[in-house]
Amino acid sequence: MAWSVVHFFNDNTVEVVPDFWFNKFKNMCAWPMDHSAKNIERREKPSSKKFFFLKARLFPGCEKIENILDARHRCKLAEQTSDVDGVIQLNKKRRSRKKINFKNSSSSSSEDNNNDESDAFNDLPAYSSNSDDDQISEKTNKASAVSLETYSGSKKSSS
C-alpha cells in the first residue's frame, strides 16, 4: 500500500494519492470528482464515472511511500520547495550525526574544575576599580624598573 505525492498542473496543487492512481507513461493522475478524502484513504480504484484524469507529475523522491503520514509530511514540503528529495536528504543527514557525550568521573571532579578556575583567577594581578590611570601607570613603571634591575643585576653577576 504505497502512496505518492503528485503535482497537478491544471490548478497547481500538490496532493497525496495512492501510487496506482498515477500513470507514469501518460503523466496523468486520477482524482475523485467529489474531491473526497475518503476515496483517497480507502484507495478506491479509479473509474471514468467517478474520477477525473488530470495532467500531473510525481515529485522526485515522493513515490512509493509506505506510510500515509510520511506522504502527507512530504506533501507539505513539496508545497514549499520543488526539491523535496533534497530536503529529505538534508533532514536525514542531520539526524545521523553522532552525539558527543562528555563524561564526568565524579561530582568531586566538577568541584575540582571550579577550584582550578578560581585558582587561575587568584593568580591575576588585582587592581582597585577606584584607581586612576596615573596609579596604574605608576605601578606598571615600578614593575618595569624592578624587572630591569633584576635583568641588569643578573648580567653583572654573570660577568
Image: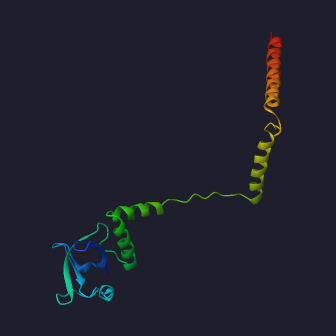
Query: Along the line of sight, which residue is nearer the eye, 31 or 137?
Result: 137
Task: Using residue 132 as the reference point, say whether residue 73 is left or right of it.
Answer: left
When the figure is inspected, residue 8 is found, relative to residue 107, above or below; the finding is below
When the figure is inspected, residue 73 is found, relative to residue 155, above or below; the finding is below
* Residue 77 at x, y percent in the picture: 37, 68
* Residue 41 at x, y percent in the picture: 33, 86
Pick the quarter of the image with the C terminus: top right
Query: Along the line of sight, which residue is nearer the eye, 72 or 94?
Result: 72
Identify which residue is drawn at 37% across, 76% down.
Answer: 72
* Residue 44 at x, y percent in the picture: 26, 88
The colour scheme is: rainbow
Identify which residue is drawn at 74% across, 59% down.
Answer: 106
Identify which residue is drawn at 22% across, 81% down.
Answer: 30
Query: Along the line of sight, which residue is nearer the eye, 70 or 98?
Result: 70
When the figure is inspected, residue 131 is found, relative to residue 152, above or below; the finding is below
When the figure is inspected, residue 122 is found, relative to residue 23, above or below; the finding is above
